[in-house]
Image (spheres, rainbow, N blue to C red):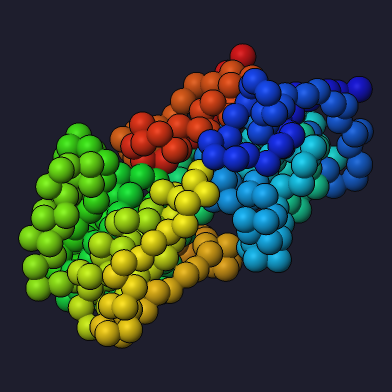
């Protein structure tokens, strides 16, 4: 009978998650796989998607009650949730023959048995692009950026737009959609190093990018947003969100996509500029990309057209693929929180 190695959630983390030492967050185990039933597939995982939202799925219930999650939290002693690209090794369905590449919620398993209805086949991408981009630009990340900016934010060409986490998976797509597809009046990125800012400006096309780790960041932000801006696409929360509340026009919009600055911290987010939400009649609009999954193919078609027209850059620079042994899967995932990656962080499983 087939077996698989599996990473389970063994303890709720207090601060940064761990995978070794006392009371580790994740523990590596091995288990048997069930035999295939009708309309099922056996898959080998090729790539894992690494997403900041996964950190919220393992919060203790006292921090975030289960009913306030948008997906069911990971239960203790069960497999850590994750999406992945997989190869079909065995199949009992004609729809997904052996050798098919599928995208599925496969969780942190080396091998898995899936219902065929829960696995989506993924054809080759144009221009010989790596299939790993199905976890980023051509996946939920791209969908998040497109619908977050254009539907939730209602961005228009005459808008000035600020994007935090601009060198990250979602931010790098928001910058390009805003500048190259929408044609926004001005697009300003915020990133964590001068090198990342050069990437945001030179590769992604932002009008300017600010290094939030610079001692002059607050002054730089005020200068860059002189006259104020219309939309702030927020991927980080915390102090940058607070600063941006003071840099929005009357009736300005915050697109609340993520809050990675606080995911590993128990400290509350303090908004010193909260009153400006009232005085400037600001709107903070939260959203979840899964609400728009039925639009995924439409967005993929838009991106392919933009790619062919030179209005979108999708290449190796937009993803950070880390060759990883299965026993190091949590180690690669934790790179999300140390600021080391540019673009989409992808785990590539190796022997």
User: Is residue 12 rendered to the left or right of residue 346?
Assistant: right
User: Is residue 128 rendered to the left or right of residue 30?
Assistant: left
Q: Residue at x 36, y 45 (%)?
A: 168
Q: x, y (%) of residue 245?
A: 28, 69
Where 141 falls versus 41 (above or below)?
Answer: below
Q: Which is more toward the observer, 134 or 238? A: 238
Q: Residue furthest top?
A: 351
Q: Residue at x 47, y 70 (%)?
A: 286
Q: x, y (%) of residue 65?
A: 68, 61
In the picture, the quarter occupied by the N terminus is top right
Q: Residue at x 50, y 21 (%)?
A: 323
Q: Residue at x 63, y 59 (%)?
A: 64
Does the image show residue 219? Answer: yes
Q: Which is more toward the observer, 192 or 32? A: 192
Q: Which is more toward the observer, 89 or 230? A: 230
Q: x, y (%) of residue 233?
A: 33, 63
Q: x, y (%) of residue 290?
A: 58, 62
């Amino acid at each position: 009978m087939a077996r698989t190695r599996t990473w389970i959630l063994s303890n709720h983390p207090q601060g940064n998650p761990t995978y070794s030492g006392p009371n580790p967050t994740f523990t590596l185990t091995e288990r048997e796989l069930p035999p295939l039933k009708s309309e099922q597939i056996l898959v080998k995982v090729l790539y894992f998607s690494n997403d900041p939202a996964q950190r919220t799925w393992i919060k203790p219930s006292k921090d975030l009650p289960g009913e306030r999650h948008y997906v069911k939290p990971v239960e203790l002693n069960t497999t850590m949730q994750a999406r992945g690209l997989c190869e079909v090794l065995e199949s009992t369905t004609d729809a997904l023959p052996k050798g098919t590449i599928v995208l599925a919620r496969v969780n942190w398993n080396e091998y898995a048995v899936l219902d065929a209805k829960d696995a989506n086949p993924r054809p080759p991408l144009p221009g010989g692009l790596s299939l790993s981009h199905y976890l980023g630009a051509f996946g939920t990340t791209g969908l998040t950026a497109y619908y977050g900016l254009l539907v939730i934010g209602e961005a228009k060409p005459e808008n000035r737009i600020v994007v935090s986490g601009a060198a990250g998976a979602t931010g790098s797509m928001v910058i390009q959609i805003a500048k190259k597809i929408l044609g926004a009046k001005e697009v300003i990125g915020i990133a964590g190093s001068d090198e990342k800012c050069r990437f945001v400006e030179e590769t992604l096309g932002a009008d300017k990018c600010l290094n939030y780790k610079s001692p002059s960041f607050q002054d730089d932000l005020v200068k860059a947003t002189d006259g104020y801006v219309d939309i702030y696409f927020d991927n980080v929360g915390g102090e940058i969100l607070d600063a941006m509340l003071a840099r929005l026009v009357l009736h300005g919009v915050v697109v609340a996509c993520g809050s990675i600055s606080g995911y590993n911290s128990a400290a509350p987010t303090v908004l010193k500029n909260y009153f400006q939400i009232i005085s400037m009649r600001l709107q903070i609009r939260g959203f979840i990309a899964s609400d728009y999954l039925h639009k995924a193919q439409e967005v993929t078609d838009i991106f392919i057209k933009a790619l062919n027209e030179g209005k979108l850059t999708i290449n190796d620079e937009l993803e950070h693929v880390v060759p990883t042994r299965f026993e190091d899967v949590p180690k690669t995932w934790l790179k999300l929180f140390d600021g080391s990656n540019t673009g989409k962080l992808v785990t590539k499983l190796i022997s």
